[in-house]
Amino acid sequence: MGITETLGNALAGRAYQLIGVVFGLAAIAHFGLWAQAPDHALDAAVATGDVSTALPEVVAYAQGHPAYVLAFVAGAVLLVRQP
């Protein structure tokens, strides 16, 4: 049994977990890029520990981008799902 076959078998058994990781990483990457945009105060608020400024920004993200929030939740569910 070659290494490619062994790796293929290992990945085939974890398809849901791989999809969950992809969903979660995509959602986290989108949030990270959104938070660093110059028109958002979240990056600066987190750096200074200003929760009163950060919280409305996070709520605005969740309201403006619900698909990414759902992608993160779905990814987490797929990642911890028991076969």
Image (cartoon, rainbow, N blue to C red):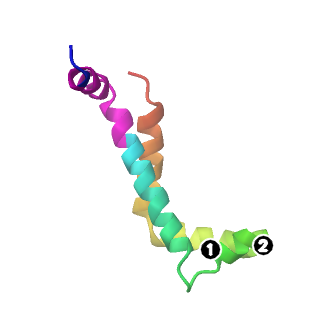
Question: Earlier along the polypeptide chain: callout 2 or callout 1?
Answer: 2
Q: Residue at x 60, y 69 (%)?
A: 59
Q: Nearer the viewer, residue 76 or 59?
A: 76
Which residue corresponds to mark 1? 57
Q: Is residue 9 magenta?
A: yes
Label 1 secondary element: helix
Which residue does the image show at 50% across and 73% down from the upper left? 34
Residue 55 shown left or right of residue 35 in the figure: right
Q: Residue furthest front?
A: 2
Residue at horizontal 40%, vertical 56%?
26
The picture places residue 63, in percent across and down from the top left corner, at: 51, 70
Depth order, front residue of 64/44: 44
For the record, the magenta segment spans 4-19
Q: Secondary structure at mark 2?
A: helix
Q: Observer-nearest residue: 47 or 60?
A: 47
Image quarter of residue 68? bottom left
Q: Which residue is mark 2?
A: 48
